Image (tube, rainbow, N blue to C red):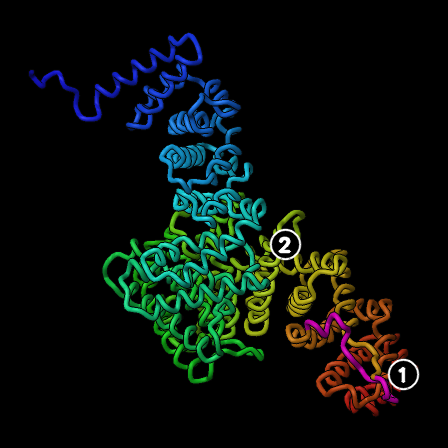
């Protein structure tokens, strides 16, 4: 016979058979006929990839009523297995789920609990119908996942817990379970952990153990997906089970990165190490023994630095490996943090630090070379933001090395900050976490209001203190830019409903801005008097300080605002801003901050009382001591400029409290630096205000000056007697 009538492979013959089965199903008059036709339909449906039109014809013939009856039927024909009807129903649902319009149907969504249960039925007998039913259930879940809002429906329906169980028990299809879990955790990490934290914790422990023990290719697959399974918080470092996970991860990564591997095998390991470094710094490295831990840290940072140099100095396009480069950036940043630690938990020896600093300097030189070469053309590229972030971390600690390269790059960095700040103003409603933005992701979109200024602020604190870079910063308009930025960050910091983490980031930015402004006040007083933006800034400082003290705001920020406001007040004393009522509120708030610092304290078994720091000030003293002393000096300098200021000192009770404090404590407990600033304050009060001078004299001011070695005060008071 001629073959011209034969259908192509996978073509008309099977479709014809399916159509006949559907006709039988539609024409069936009783359950027996319908059941027989259904067996044929499901066999055909499973035997081929169905077109959309065919799937709809099956659905039109079957609908959801038949799968519903099959799922909940209590009896099966004699001689048939108990799971027969469920298997048929799940096969039909799997067929429907391949259609996006059906996968999101409420009648399918409400089957999620049944599908979850199906994943973990026992398939020990290896019966084909059972394994097929499990595979069909996975196909259903995958179809729902691909539908709009499907991931949220699965998480709400406890699918995460069932998938975790399937993996833990290594049930049939457990690789599908891991794949769907990876997608769910990528889409909705917080929701997944909130809904199924116990199950995910057990799964993560298992994955980490497997990563440590596996020696085949599966180990590299785990390295690729493990970043998705890390909890969205620092819980690993805070719990015994989390510590156990980190030990396995550390050992597994050490085995991989100590071996000669292909790029495809090494890159996932670098990305996993980068994720851990980004969250935990170096504390995730849990190799036995301090020396071994230091060696592993050095290995990671050295590998990262070499990779950065190879990628950025290569003339070939970098696009295909940007995620690897940003991963390496995270580990270089970890190295910077470790080398600049000054507390008692130092991991690296001095010679190890010096070696790492050298390789990190070379890596940062490569970053600067890259930005100088292509940065102007790639303002839009998120990788540029990642590069700026790393450079900011380096320059925050080291500006003397590569000094000429830094100065040459400054115009670009300023342009980059200005560009993204203006876009940030335009797209304020789209703000996202910059720390996440600058790490590992490559799908951020063309327009993103990145906060590049935040990354560079610590570096600007150093650079604004040096003449050559400061001149460039001023010439490029950085002071006006930072004034605008300060106002924006203040709005975010003071706004109600802002997440605590965002508020804290805004606070750090505000404090760093104050550091830059203080450098300018000290080194460029003419600029402060000439630029109108500083009058606007001073007005904002005066208005926000009383608010912060009322709310008992963070003391470090209060110290920065107080001292900067005082330093600027000396230079802008003729400004109309001091005619406003809030100017006196500002100085009252300053007095409140300065006067609360020292208290009378006495140790047990000691006869004499001594001067001590208020508890709140003692906790922050490392960060605020210089600001406090500078603030008292600046306040003293403001007294002759504002005649009404000494009256505020009297009415506030600060002078009375200060004299009482000096009466009560042992002179030997007051250090020379404190004596010096208090003498300047008391002398200025005595010179500018008769009531203040009379009060000081009436409280034994001459005697106090003699006892405390305040010669200038003693002479001033003696001349006025």
> Magenta residues?
604-620
Residue 205, position as x, y percentages in the image: 50, 57
Q: Nearer the viewer, mark 2 or mark 1?
A: 2
Q: Residue at x 77, y 83 (%)?
A: 679
Q: Residue at x 58, y 47 (%)?
A: 194
Query: In this image, 310 relative to 208: left or right?
Result: left
- Crowd band around label 1 with a 10 angstrom C-alpha radius: few (<14), some (14–19), many (20+): some
Relative depth, front residue between 544 and 102: 102
**Is any atom of residue 573 visible in this view?**
no
Q: Residue furthest right?
A: 698
> Across the whole image, how many numbered discs are drawn on residues?
2
- Crowd band around label 2 with a 10 angstrom C-alpha radius: few (<14), some (14–19), many (20+): few
| Rendered-image quadrant of the N terminus | top left
| Rendered-image quadrant of the C terminus | bottom right
Question: Compared with residue 44, is residue 132 higher up or lower down, i.e. above or below?
Answer: below
Relative depth, front residue between 676 and 2: 2
Q: Residue at x 27, y 17 (%)?
A: 17
Q: Residue furthest front?
A: 79
Question: Compared with residue 638, is residue 715 higher up or lower down, i.e. above or below?
Answer: below
Q: Of the numbered discs in the image, which one, if any, rests on residue 244?
A: none
State the SS at label 2.
helix
Instruction: Provide the residue designation for mark 1.
Output: 697
Question: Compared with residue 441, is residue 134 higher up or lower down, i.e. above or below?
Answer: above
The image quarter containing residue 588 is bottom right
Question: Spatial distance from mark 2 to mark 1, Cα to Cα?
Answer: 50 Å
State the SS at label 1.
helix
Is residue 348 shown in magenta?
no
Q: Of the numbered discs in the image, which one, if any, rests on residue 500?
A: 2
Q: Is there a contact, CB below 8 Å, between mark 2 and mark 1?
A: no
Relative depth, front residue between 165 and 139: 165
């Amino acid at each position: 016979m001629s073959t011209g009538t034969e259908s192509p492979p996978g073509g008309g013959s099977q479709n014809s058979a399916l159509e006949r089965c559907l006709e039988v199903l539609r024409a069936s008059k009783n359950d027996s006929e319908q059941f027989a036709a259904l067996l044929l339909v499901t066999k055909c449906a499973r035997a081929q990839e169905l077109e959309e039109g065919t799937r709809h014809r099956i659905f039109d013939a079957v609908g959801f009523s038949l799968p519903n009856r099959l799922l909940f039927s209590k009896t099966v024909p004699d001689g048939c297995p108990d799971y027969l009807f469920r298997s048929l129903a799940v096969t039909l649902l799997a067929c429907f789920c391949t259609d996006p319009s059906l996968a999101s149907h409420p009648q399918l969504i409400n089957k999620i609990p049944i599908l979850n249960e199906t994943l973990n039925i026992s398939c020990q007998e290896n019966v084909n119908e059972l394994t097929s039913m499990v595979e069909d259930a996975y196909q259903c879940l995958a179809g729902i996942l691909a539908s709009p809002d499907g991931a949220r429906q699965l998480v709400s329906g406890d699918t995460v817990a069932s998938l975790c169980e399937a993996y833990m028990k290594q049930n049939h299809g457990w690789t599908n379970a891991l794949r769907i879990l990876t997608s769910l955790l990528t889409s909705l990490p917080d929701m997944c952990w909130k809904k199924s934290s116990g199950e995910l914790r057990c799964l993560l422990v298992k994955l980490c153990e497997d990563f440590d023990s596996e020696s085949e290719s599966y180990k590299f697959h785990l390295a690729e997906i493990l970043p998705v399974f890390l909890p969205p918080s620092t819980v690993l470092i805070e719990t015994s089970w989390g510590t156990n996970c980190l030990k396995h991860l550390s050992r597994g990564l050490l085995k991989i990165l100590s071996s000669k591997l292909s790029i495809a095998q090494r890159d996932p390991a670098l990305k996993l190490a980068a994720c851990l470094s980004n969250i935990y710094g170096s504390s995730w490295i849990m190799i036995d023994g301090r020396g071994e831990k230091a060696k592993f840290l050095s290995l990671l940072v050295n590998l990262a630095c070499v990779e950065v140099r190879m990628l950025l100095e290569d003339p070939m396009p970098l696009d295909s490996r940007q995620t690897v480069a940003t991963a390496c950036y995270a580990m270089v940043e970890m190295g910077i943090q470790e080398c600049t630690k000054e507390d008692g938990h130092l991991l690296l020896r001095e010679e190890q630090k010096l070696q790492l600093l050298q390789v990190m300097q070379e890596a940062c030189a490569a970053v600067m070379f890259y930005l100088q070469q292509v940065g102007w053309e790639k303002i839009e590229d998120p990788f540029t933001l990642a590069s700026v972030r790393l450079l900011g971390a380096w320059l925050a600690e080291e500006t003397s090395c590569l000094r000429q390269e830094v100065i040459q790059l400054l115009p670009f960095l300023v342009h980059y900050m200005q560009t993204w700040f203006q876009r940030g103003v335009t797209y304020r409603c789209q703000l996202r976490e910059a720390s996440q933005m600058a790490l590992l992701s490559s799908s951020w979109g063309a327009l993103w209001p990145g906060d590049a200024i935040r990354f560079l602020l610590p570096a600007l604190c150093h650079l604004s203190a040096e003449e050559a870079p400061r001149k460039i910063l001023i010439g490029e308009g950085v002071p006006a830019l930072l004034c605008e930025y300060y106002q924006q960050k203040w709005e975010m910091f003071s706004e109600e409903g802002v997440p605590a983490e965002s508020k804290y980031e805004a606070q750090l930015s505000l404090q760093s801005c104050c550091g830059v402004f203080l450098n300018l006040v000290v080194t460029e007083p003419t600029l402060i008097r000439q630029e109108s933006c500083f009058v606007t800034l001073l007005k904002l400082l005066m208005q926000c300080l009383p608010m912060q003290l009322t709310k008992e705001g963070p003391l470090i920020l209060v110290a920065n605002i107080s001292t900067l406001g005082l330093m600027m007040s000396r230079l802008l004393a003729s400004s109309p801003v001091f005619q406003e009522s809030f100017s006196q509120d500002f100085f009252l708030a300053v007095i409140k901050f300065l006067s609360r610092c020292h208290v009378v304290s006495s140790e047990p078994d000691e006869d004499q009382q001594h001067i001590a720091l208020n508890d709140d000030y003692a906790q922050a003293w490392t960060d605020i001591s210089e600001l406090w002393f500078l603030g008292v000096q600046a306040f003293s300098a403001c007294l002759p400029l504002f005649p009404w200021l000494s009256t505020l000192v009297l009415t506030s009770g600060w002078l009375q409290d200060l004299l009482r404090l000096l009466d009560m404590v042992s002179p030997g407990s007051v250090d020379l630096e404190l004596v010096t600033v208090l003498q300047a304050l008391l002398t200025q009060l005595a010179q500018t205000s008769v009531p203040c001078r009379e009060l000081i004299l009436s409280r034994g001011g001459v005697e106090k000056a003699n006892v405390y070695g305040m010669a200038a005060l003693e002479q001033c008071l003696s001349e006025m007697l």
